[in-house]
Image (spheres, rainbow, N blue to C red):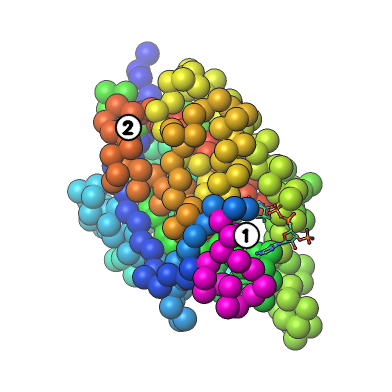
Amino acid sequence: MTQKKQAGILGLGAYLPERILTNADLEKMVDTSDEWIRTRTGIRERRIAEKGTATSDLAVKASLEAIQNSGLKPSDLDLIILATVTPDMIFPSTACILQNKIGATCPAFDLSAACSGFTYGLALAEGLIRSETYKHILVVGAEVISGFINWKDRSTCVLFGDGAGAAVIGETHDGHGILATYMGSDGSQARLLQIPAGGSAIPPSISSIETGLHYVQMDGAEVFKSAVRTMGDAIQEITKRAHLTIQGIDCLIPHQANLRILNAVSDRTKIPIEKIFVNLDRYGNMSAASTIVALYEAVKEGKIKKGSTVVMVAFGSGLTWAACALRW
Ligand code: UT7
């Protein structure tokens, strides 16, 4: 019997806008405090793209680094999957805009799974590599979410930030690469986290803008509970699928929404908090960019080394959740 190909990450890239918005800055904008934001979320600062910056602009920088680190050229790519909830425009896809900006010629499409989008993209890319449909796939998570935030709503504006991360997926050998993937969705909870207007259900209008329906809206407490439950369950499921044990996980790369969520996931799964990579203090919640930027930084900081067992886990609007186990 012929062994199926194994897929894995060949190169990583990330880009964060230079402008830093601190909790002290937010104190001047809404009725909040550094103390509230730090203790309720763990966030200290976030990056905000300059006015006029599109999601594809951040994606270009992250993608070119990932392609370079994989030893490839943009013309070597066979497919681009770009996960975002803040596309440059409704159509064409941001992936097509990125394809042109980096000088690639392959098929390209956007993937909508909110904060789980990058991890969904990894699952898709793995299948396409293993089935030998494509050889080199660029998976990107990129957001300029600052343009969709009501900067007068303290319950949401302190939480989010802009950023982008990218990975080139291709064939890997000797047991290194993606061990298992898992995706889940529950559309019955869609209302918990959404931008209601701007699509076909509520097309943009003066009234949609006046009532703030084109901004992120969230039932924070309910989303919090679902995040802890679904990320905990997804970790159990991926551990089973990859034939791992909880103790065998060297580094957990979770979606970066709230430090209290990560502490609760640690309690629920018994993964020690020291093994959970955290950078939300510096970037806040970057939706689809969160897990990939965290993976990039964990590798750069030496928290993930050759042979490390890594689990990525994400959760977001949809509701969606996803996990991926890798041997680095
Ligand atoms: O990417 C998708 C995943 N997203 C998430 O996972 C987010 C999940 N949810 C959360 O992280 C938390 O629910 C929040 C951080 C959003 C909120 O924390 P919480 O502990 O659930 O606070 P709360 O919404 O229950 O609000 C508690 C109080 C309220 O005041 P009252 O009604 O008790 O007087 C809020 O008005 O805190 C108030 N509050 C704030 N106070 C100061 C809400 N936002 C702020 C703020 N500054 N920024």
The spot of residue 237 in percent (x, y) is 58, 26
* Of labels 2 and 1, the one closer to you: 1
Q: Which residues are magenta?
A: 23-38
Q: Where is ligand 1, by quadrant?
A: bottom right
- Could you tell me what secondary structure mostly forms the magenta stretch? helix
| Residue at 42% across, 48% down | 294
Residue at coordinates 63% horizontally, 53% vertically from top-left?
Answer: 40
Taking 328 as reference, is 93 above or below it?
below
Quadrant containing the C terminus in the rendered view: top left
- Reading the image, the residue beneath label 2 is 328
Residue at figure coordinates x 35%, y 48% from the top left: 297
Quarter assignment of residue 248? top left
Q: CA distance from mark 2 to mark 1?
A: 37 Å
What residue did someone put label 1 on?
36
Q: Position of residue 242 (x, y in %)?
A: 48, 22
Q: Is residue 315 above or below residue 285?
A: above
Residue 24 in sight here: yes
